Image (spheres, rainbow, N blue to C red):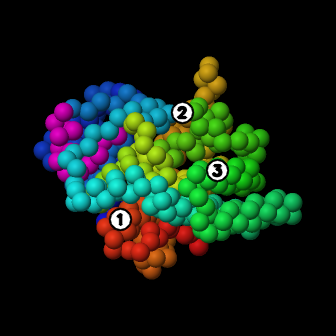
Amino acid sequence: MKRLLNTLYITRHGAHISKEGMTIVVFADGERLLQIPVLTISGVVCFGGVSCTPPAMELCSEHGVIITFLSESGRFLGRVVGPVHGNVLLRREQYRIADDEARSAEIARMFIIGKICNSRQVLMRGARDRKDPQVIDDLKAASRRLIQTARHIKQGTPADELLGKEGDSAKTYFASFNNLITSQHQEFRFTIRSRRPPLDCVNAMLSFVYTLLSHDATAALESVGLDPFVGFFHKDRPGRPGLALDLMEEFRSLLADRIVISLINLQQVNPKGFITTESGSVKMDDDTRTSVISAYQKRKHEEIRHPFLNENIPIGLLVHAQALLLARYIRGDLDKYPPFFWK
């Protein structure tokens, strides 16, 4: 289980990955930076100008280590994956469900309900930490709207309305997001969620951590034999890991958003660590990106109680646990897919 928590992130421009025996070695500017046994890691994520030799790719593929290549800002470029594992019957059933609007909508509802409920928990915890009565009232009002939406979806929102309901809940949540920021208000002021490209420091960090989470969700689905590119809520689009995006919905606020909020509030990121390009896109510099990755990895090792499994597990294994539960549901071992609810 520990192996699943160990993802190697390489952020140094010009770094080079090679193979020595059963280890992978990272070089940069003629210097050996790291040598690590392939059996101790579950994935390698390369940012920017990082290269990898074919033997290193072969070694990783043989041992189920996914190599992902991203741009410096975290945009997905490509992935090296070994042979597909898992029961072909499981994937065939996944494809059948994806082609059935009613069945795929049933699973999509669970993903969205989990996302909304966990987003509400983030707002409620933020309300407990604030002293301004107006801010507290605003956060509680947004929380009430979210739970009302979740209840409406649970009652059986039609498939063609799910996207709209999810969008409304996201607008409600992000409209209150700035109230969660308690320090560096001016430098990290959040007004609206902007994705492609991120137009401020907060959005740059959110998009970056979502990319890290997407990598983990993809690896989790691969590990249980599901196809990460065939989703139930996020429909097919070339190159988009639809099911990975479905699975990570439950963890966006709990894992990604709370990391960004903590980094800002604890002043572990500095506004000088962000660069605005000519196009208006905001990017992190190397030191800031390293700080965000470090916080993400640290958070993954913290333990949390899984309400369905009724046991404590590291936060980094939550996506793996949910991928396993999803596979069990698709196989018919569970009556419903149980989303993760943070308490």
- Nearest the eye: 70 or 28: 70
Q: What is the x, y in percent for residue 128? A: 74, 68
Q: Is residue 310 left or right of residue 121?
A: left
What type is the residue that disc 2 sits on?
Answer: Asp
- Residue 165: horizontal and vertical position, in percent? 65, 54
Task: Give the crowd class for mark 3: few <14, some 14-19, many >=20 residues within 10 Å.
Answer: few
Tag of residue 164: 3
Determine whether the residue tagged by mark 1 lies in a helix, strand or loop: helix
**Outermost residue, left direction?**
21
Count of numbered badges drawn on the protein = 3
Q: Earlier in the sequence, mark 1 or mark 3?
A: 3
Tag 3: amino acid: Gly
Estimate the spatial distance between the alpha carbons at disc 1 and disc 3, rounded to whole Å.
26 Å
At horizontal 16% and vertical 36% (from top left) the residue drawn is 55
Looking at the image, which residue sits at the far bottom?
310
Residue 11 appears in the figure: no
Toward which corner of the image does residue 69 lie, by quadrant? Answer: top left
Can residue 297 be found in the magenta stretch?
no
Task: Name the residue carrying label 1.
Answer: 330
The region drawn magenta spans: 54-69
Q: Identify the residue at image location x=41%, y=75%.
A: 335
Q: Which residue is mark 2?
A: 285
Tag 2: Cα neighbours inside 10 Å, few (<14), some, or many (≥20)?
Answer: some
- Label 2: state its secondary structure: loop
- Whether residue 276 sits left or right of residue 97 in the image: it is right
